[in-house]
Amino acid sequence: MTRTVLRTCLAAVVAIGLIVQGALAPAPAAPAGTTLTLALFADPVSFDPHRSNDGPSNMMWHQLYNTLVDRNEKGEIVPALAEKWQRIGDRTWRFTLRQGVKFHDGSEVTADDVKFSLERLIDPATRSPAAFLLTVLDRVEVEGRYQVRLVLKSPFAPLLFHLMHKPTSIVPAALVRANPDEFARRPVGTGPFKFGSYVRGDRIELVRNPDYWGGAPKFERIIIRIVPDASTAIAELESGGVAGVFSVPPHEVARLQRNRNLTMLVLPSHRITALVLNLDRPPFNDRKVRLAASYAIDRKATLNSIEAGLGVLASSALAPLVFGHNDELQPFPRDLTKARQLLAEAGYAGGLKTEMLVWNLPASVKLAEVTQAQFREAGIEISIKVTEFGAALREQYAGNFTISTMLWGTVTLDGDYSMYALFHSDSIGPAGNWGRYSNPEVDRLIMTGRTNGNPVVRKQAYLKAQEIIANDAPWIFLYHPSMVYALRSEIKDVTIPPQGYVFINLTKGYLGR
Amino acid sequence: MMETGSASVWRRLLRHRLAVAGALIVGGLLLVALLAPLLAPHDPITQNLGDAFQPSSRQHPLGTDEFGRDILSRIIFGTRVSLLVGVVSVGIGLVAGVPAGLLSGYVGGVVDVSISGVMDVLLAVPGVLLAIAIVAVLGPGLFNVMVATGISSVPVFARLARGSVLTVKETEFIEAVRALGGTPGRVLFRHILPNIAAPLFVMASLYMASAILTAAGLSFLGLGAQPPTPEWGAMLSRGREYLRSAPHIATYPGIAIFIAVMGFNFLGDGLRDALDPRLKV
Amino acid sequence: MLHLTPGDPVAIMIGIEGMADPQMVANLRRELGLDQPLHIQYWRFLRRAVVGDLGKSIRTNEPVRVEVMSRFPATVELAVAAFILSTLIGVAAGVTSAVRQYSLLDHASMVGAMLGASIPVFWLGMMLILLFAVRYPLLPVSGRGAPFAEAVALLFQGDASTLVRALRHLILPAVCLGLSRAAVVARLTRSSMLEVLRQEYVRTARAKGLRERVVVYRHALRNALIPIVTIVGLQFGFLLGGAVIAEVVFSWPGVGRLAVDSILARDYPVVQGCVLLVAAIFVLLNLSTDLLYGWLNPRIRYQ
């Protein structure tokens, strides 16, 4: 009797052994060298570029569609679907399209598609969370089969930088009009890869577009696996299950750098990690308290603890690689004596108690914990209120907080994107100026940067604005974290530009040995 | 019946070696929880960023976490959290489930049908998922996790109490009490409850184990204890990010959960054998 | 019921680089019916649920039914694999223990069962990944190899590699999920077997001179199976629910992970859909367990 049981167990063990051995045999599925598998930390919200604005979706749109213009690796604006363009008036731009570009279904890209796409993005009925990119757009006029005129409501200098952002991707008007939901399920664009299949929570498959106008990609297929947990994604990378990971925990970098099978990319980013102070409420309506809080923070220690030191300390919302960055400004040093003195002057000699609104993202919670400990040493007691992301945003829109965590990116790499949204008094509320900062001089400078066509004048305006903001101290600027990505070493010629992984270029990549 | 002499229960319990081990573990946990401030070598909350990611040393026997906090101290204080979670969850289950089950079994009729109906609905969702659904309604947080695990234990205790009442109710002993004019409340709480205490006690011990495990699981998923509370599941979840470069951060809290759950399982199992060998879960 | 949650799904849809027009947010809330009182929202939900319309996901705008059902096969696969594993290991260990009561093997497997029931699933999963996928890269780290049904279909077209891949991806999550359940099954099998082995008819069978193996399997196990079937049937339901954590650890694209993701994103309709589906399956399983019980137990069958 026991023999039977044992025999059954043995059979099971043998079966398992056979399956395990499958690991050692070469997988005959896809010919090696033609498929690239990447891990992504979340599902894209939508394949329709006008229905979301999250990172994973943007990354998919970058493969499936094209925008009118693009940025090259050096950050210069280069032609994409638009062959050339011209600012023909204060508020008018003309774009000439590249001829003969085909959507994946074989139809040609025309001026009608451009008009449809851009106007669809800003149509309130579309409900695109990225509509803000083109709120200045009044209308698009079709001037010919391959020519459009963009008419703006007011002069807008950074238009081209906004037109390279993925939500402005050009979609086939006829298909989308016919059935927008079906289009979102089986997207059709002009990009280097066509949509293959998608199993939510599992994987996305893209296939090569052999007719790509920019030259056919070398990879036959791109598989994007959804692996939410960063440590699991790293384990996949190390064991060769995936070839690229875009959510590398910073503390793993040193260890992974010793692995010869991996190429670690630690790149400067356009992001800012900061604390927003509410200027409408005590205690931070008092500049002295704001300065005290800023002196209480040890930025270097915070960067080391949360990002393993990968990044640069910040003195402004604009990272060094963003147009308009002021490199004269110095980050606040930690000075507890000064902090206590300023607090005493502001009437908080006995210490200060308040609450910090924190997004329920692991990185934000960690930041809050470190800040809490550092504040305590300066006599500032904060309690941490971890709030689900959406709810926290609502509180922030409404100005319902005294201090809160903030992560922001200047995706267009142009100062306007952040300066206008974060510090202009018109942006108070949901647009981004949650701390209710308002300074007429800064407003004027930001508008100069927004409307003036001369880059030199624009730059000067941003430099001055950042100086004034640093002095007013509406935020506690902490650091610009590096972007950390990991690829298997056999991946060649895959490039990630300064805008981040979303804009990863897979058209020239291949698997080497 | 259950009229077992307490001396013989003790003897049987002691004969059950695993039960003794379980009792020792549970006793140890209680002691650690009570004496936490005395036992912990460091403060469990205070950060020391310069000391982060230290492996075990004389100063930090189990090493330090990403904020330089002493892991041993955090585990010691975490004992309080986990025991509290277990006690509160089981408490909710007992306080809400037992009267409901007693009533249901004793009164019968419409009362029984409606109470059993509610319990069946709760039982229709497997434990962990029910707890998750409840936390989804209440919002994440340690207290809400206790409520969630508590609520999901209510039908278990109610069903046990109801079943036990049904067997006890028809005995001559209870019928005699009723004939002598005992009020239903009196009969239920003075005569029936003591008679079904043994199975409830066993179930409580076993459920402590599963409540601790479920709560740790919810914290692991980010739905439970919020920082900087030293909760084992949350510590483990946090440590997962550093699993490869500093594995001790996730490993020790996992072992702590394991030991605590094992302790209550051993104890409950031993109690079952000692109190009522026929009782099955 | 999930509308009591602190959190506003509309803000989620608007997203991080929000800058949404407040008017737009208000319109969206109206469209989703989130501006209505709770009882009206709940009534609407019930009315639609009865006809199989669970609403639309707030995050993706897809019907909840589609979202949940597309994840369901993955969870069933995992639960079935864990179920087979836990039943095989559990019954084998239980029978062995009972036949050799008080032997070293018995003690070892019962202590092992207790330990197995006490291991936190998420911790076990992490350790399994570290050991069998990273340290000794024998098995894949995470994810689902291929839909099982598809893999079987390919097998009939002569492609076995897809099935092998699917099975290899299944092993670690199934072991992780099944182990604690195997412990429960083992303990129950043992006690049930012990009880049966003491029965008259077993002694009679032995006295008739039947071989031990026939006695144990033909007579004892068949009767001992009755309570085992009940518990094992319930186990399957628990596996469906308990799969949540294993799915998160192994990035398994199942209903459990969908539920957790949706809770964190406040996608109420999807959470409701997930819970409803698993509860429905659980009830169905209970029912079929009862039927099976009747079939196995002649005393009930002939009533």
Image (tube, coloured by chain):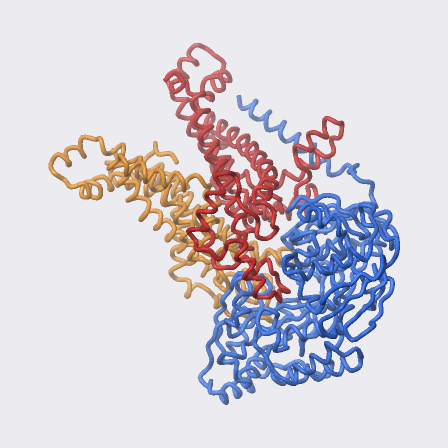
Colour chosen for chain C: red
Q: Which chain is orange?
A: B
Q: Nearer the viewer, residue C191 or B151?
A: B151
Q: Is residue A286 above or below residue B40?
A: below
Q: Residue at x 42, y 43 (%)?
A: B265
Residue sitting nearer the eye, A187 or B168: A187
Residue at 76% across, 62% down: A265
Q: Quadrant where the C terminus of chain C lies?
A: top left
Q: Position of residue C223 (x, y in %)?
A: 43, 21
Q: Quadrant of residue C168?
A: top right
C201 is higher (above) or lower (below) than C69: above
Q: Is residue B241 left or right of residue A386?
A: right
Considering only vertical position in the picture, is A37 above or below A318? Answer: above
The image shows residue B100 at horizontal and vertical percentages of 30, 43
Residue C33 left/right relative to B110? right
Q: Colour of chain A?
A: blue
* Residue B252 at least partly seen: no
Seen from the viewer's position, the closer of residues C101 and B88 is B88
